[in-house]
Amino acid sequence: MDWGLWIMFAILVVMVVCVVIISNRREKTAAQNGVFDERQMKIRGDAFKWSFIVMVVYYMAYAILISFAGEGLGAPELMIFIGLELGLVFCSVYCILRDAFLAINRSFGFIVILDVCCIVAQLVGYFRERAQGALLIEDGKLTTTGLPLSIAVSFMIILVALLVRRHYEKREEQNEA
Amino acid sequence: MKNLRLKAARASLDLSQEELANKVGVSRQTISAIEKGDYNPTINLCVAICRVLGRTLDDLFWDEPKE
C-alpha cells in the first residue's frame, strides 16, 4: 500500500475511535440528549423538502443542458454525484444556520472533528490520484478525479457554516449573560 | 411578538436560557426563539415551560386581544 492509503486508513481508525469514545460517554448523560426538539424537527422537515427541490432543479437543469448541448460540463458520474452533494450541503447548511443540525446537547467539537477528518481524507485521495497522473480536466470536461475534491468542498462548506453559526451563538450567549 | 413575560419569569427564578432548556428538554436556541417571538411553541412545550417556571399558561402565553 502507498502512503495515501495508509493516511486514509489512519484517519478512518481515528474517526471510529472518536465515535466509540463519544458514544460511550453520551450514554451516561441526560436522557433527552441526542433527540431533536419540536422546533428543530420542523426546521429539519423544511430542510429536507427544500433540499429535495434543489436536487430536482439541478437534475432538470442538467437534463436540459444535455438535451441542448449534447454533453455536460463533466463526466456523467461526477455530474450526478454533484446533484446529491448539492442536496446534502443545502440541507446541512439550512439546518446549521437555523440551529437544527445538532440534537440537544450534542457536541459541536465532535461534528467539527468528523468534518475535518472527512475533508482531509478526501483531499488525500484527490492529491494521491493527481500524483499518479490523473487529470482534473480532460478535453475541457471535468473528470471523475474531481469526485473526492467535490466531496471535500462540500464538507468545507458545511464546516464554514458550522463555524459561522458557532460564532453567532457565542455572541448570543454573551448578550444573554 | 417578543415574549417578555417568559423572559421575566425565567429571570425571576435566576435561570439562564440554557438551564431552562435543560429542564424542559429542548435546545437553548428554542427557548431563545420563543422569547424573541420567532417560534410559536406547541401546547405541550408551553405546559412544560409553565410547570418548570411555576406559572400558568395565561401568565406566560395568553395575550388579551387588542381593542
Image (spheres, coloured by chain):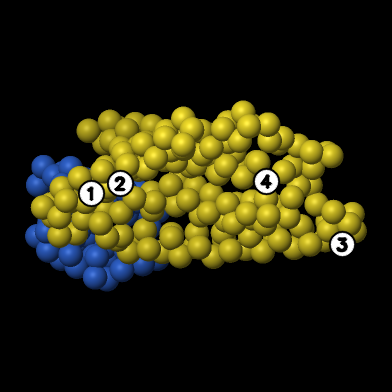
Chain colours: A yellow, B blue
Q: Please, which residue is most extreme toward the bottom here?
A: B43
- At 12% from the left and 59% from the top, the residue drawn is B52
- At 46% from the left and 30% from the top, the residue drawn is A3
Chain of the residue under the numbered disc 4 shown in the image:
A
Circles 2 and 4: CB atoms closer than 8 Å: no
Circles 1 and 4: CB atoms closer than 8 Å: no
Residue A67 shows which numbered tag?
3
Residue type marked 3: Ser
Q: Earlier in the sequence, mark 2 or mark 4?
A: 2
Residue A50 placement: quadrant: bottom right
Q: Are marks 3 and 1 on the same chain?
A: yes
Q: Earlier in the sequence, mark 3 or mark 1?
A: 1
Q: Earlier in the sequence, mark 4 or mark 3?
A: 3
Residue type marked 4: Thr
Q: Secondary structure at mark 2?
A: helix
Mark whose residue sits in front, 3 or 1: 1
- At 39% from the left and 40% from the top, the residue drawn is A9
| Residue A157 position within the rendered picture, expressed as x and y whole percent measured from the top left | 53, 39
Q: Which residue is mark 4?
A: A144
Q: Which residue is mark 2?
A: A16
Closer to the camera in the image, A134 or B3: A134
